[in-house]
Image (cartoon, rainbow, N blue to C red):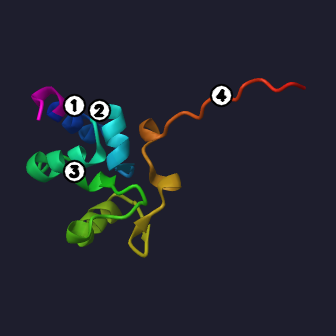
């Protein structure tokens, strides 16, 4: 993997504020990484010193093998999960939310 891309993914994850979450796809988009899976790879191999617990699947859930620890860390930051799922509309990091495309002017 390109070292610059690796560091960019790490930097984006580092910027996710306490009490907020982003998806693997959000991080990939911001870092201009080719895929969310690459973000997961970086976090798995070199994310121990990052707030990795703030990165979730696109549906607001945790990866099963880390779910208990991840949900506990999120709870400590005030992020509430309902049945193992975080409400992304409530807790998603504002920088990760794509701006809605402006609607073209109507005919009337």
Q: Quadrant of residue 8?
A: top left
Kindly report the distance in space between the C-alpha atoms of the residues bearing marks 2 and 1: 6 Å
Q: Residue at x 40, y 55 (%)?
A: 58
Q: Quadrant of residue 86?
A: bottom left
Highlighted range, magenta: 1-5
Mark 1 vs mark 4: which is more N-terminal?
A: 1
Mark 1 vs mark 3: which is more N-terminal?
A: 1
Q: Which residue is mark 3?
A: 40
Report x, y in % for residue 99: 54, 33
Q: Which residue is mark 4?
A: 102
Report x, y in % for residue 79: 40, 60
Of residues 30 and 106, the one drawn nearer to the viewer in this rendering: 106
Kindly report the distance in space between the C-alpha atoms of the residues bearing marks 3 and 4: 32 Å
Q: Are marks 1 and 3 in contact (CB under 8 Å)?
A: no
Report x, y in % for residue 70: 26, 64
Q: Which residue is mark 2?
A: 31
């Amino acid at each position: 993997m390109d070292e610059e891309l690796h560091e960019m993914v790490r930097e984006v994850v580092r910027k996710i504020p306490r009490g907020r979450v982003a998806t693997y796809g959000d991080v990939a988009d911001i870092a201009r990484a080719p895929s969310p899976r690459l973000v997961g790879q970086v976090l798995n191999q070199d994310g121990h010193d990052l707030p990795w617990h703030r990165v979730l699947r696109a549906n607001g859930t945790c990866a099963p093998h880390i779910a208990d620890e991840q949900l506990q860390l999120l709870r400590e930051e005030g992020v509430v999960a309902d049945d193992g799922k975080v409400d992304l509309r409530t807790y998603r990091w504002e920088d990760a939310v794509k701006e809605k495309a402006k609607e073209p002017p109507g005919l009337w």
